[in-house]
Image: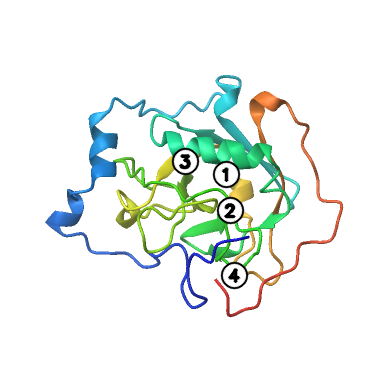
Amino acid sequence: MFKALVSAPMALLLAFAPVVASAQDSEPDNSATAAATQRQMRIAVDYDQTKDLEDILYLDLSNGQRVAIRLMPDWAPGAVERIKTLTRQGFYDGVIFHRVIDGFMAQTGDPTGTGQGGSELPDLKAEFNPLPHVRGTVSMARAESEDSANSQFFIMFYPRFALDKRYTNFGRVIGNMAAVDAIHRGEPPQDPTWIVQASIASDHKAQKFADVAPPAVASAGAN
């Protein structure tokens, strides 16, 4: 049974508008952030798609393009493991980008297409870290609770530093950001782009193309 993470008028990604960070915001007293800061992390993102294939996520989109995402377990081991688990279960196959805001981000990972669904796995503990939300960042969506991320994630079109240390940044697009830019906008889009197949590079799955009708679109009032 899918868990209703938020009520209909609300979106999982709470920080819709820029937030003016206070001094307290810049150094939050958050155990998850503190733990991530204290442990040694590999900061640099490797854009070489021939290396560390176990940590590359492919998204074959309905626009006929394959997007490559570098997963960063050093940044958020729990989130990366969740994404891999669900990917290998086929959870993301056929799921639309249900919330796509021009100049901000594209959100997916809800099989109901409403923004209120998730997987049957338990919610994740927050793994906030100091890595910035720049163009191409891939981060976990959540409800109001910091420990409510489950299956939904978003990809940044442009930087939004107000999200830093508030959402679990777990990866970066390393190939074909242009295909992300081409995702259809809307909340939800009238003609949504969807994930035809998600796969881990080390599993060596051939790119899959859309050969069926698009998934049903949620009602306009849902997020």
Tell me the CA gap for discs 2 and 1.
6 Å
Query: What's the amino acid at mark 3?
Result: Ala
**Count of residue discs:** 4
User: Is 149 in front, or is 218?
Assistant: 149
x then y, percent, for residue 63: 73, 52
The residue labelled by disc 3 is: 79
Task: Compare marks 1 and 3 and give the one earlier in the sequence.
Answer: 3
Question: Can you say which quadrant of the picture contains the C terminus?
Answer: bottom right
Q: Are marks 1 and 4 in contact (CB under 8 Å)?
A: no
Q: Nearer the viewer, mark 2 or mark 3?
A: 3
x then y, percent, for residue 201: 65, 28
Query: What's the amino acid at mark 4?
Result: Gly
Seen in the picture, residue 50 relative to 18 is either above or below; the reply is: above
| Other-residue count near label 2 (Cα within 10 Å), few / some / many at <14 / 14–19 / ≥20 | some
The residue labelled by disc 1 is: 177
* Image quadrant where residue 22 sits: bottom left
User: What is the number of the mark on residue 186?
Assistant: 4
Query: What's the amino acid at mark 1?
Result: Met
User: Is 139 in front, or is 209?
Assistant: 139
- Residue at screen point 54% across, 54% down: 152
x then y, percent, for residue 142: 44, 57
- Residue at screen point 47% across, 69% down: 6
Task: Compare marks 2 and 4 and give the one earlier in the sequence.
Answer: 2
Seen in the picture, residue 78 relative to 133 is either above or below; the reply is: above
Seen in the picture, residue 99 relative to 124 is either above or below; the reply is: below
| Other-residue count near label 1 (Cα within 10 Å), few / some / many at <14 / 14–19 / ≥20 | some
Is disc 2 placed on a helix, strand or loop?
helix
Query: In the rendered view, does 23 fall on the left or right side of 182?
Result: left
Tell me the CA gap for discs 3 and 4.
26 Å
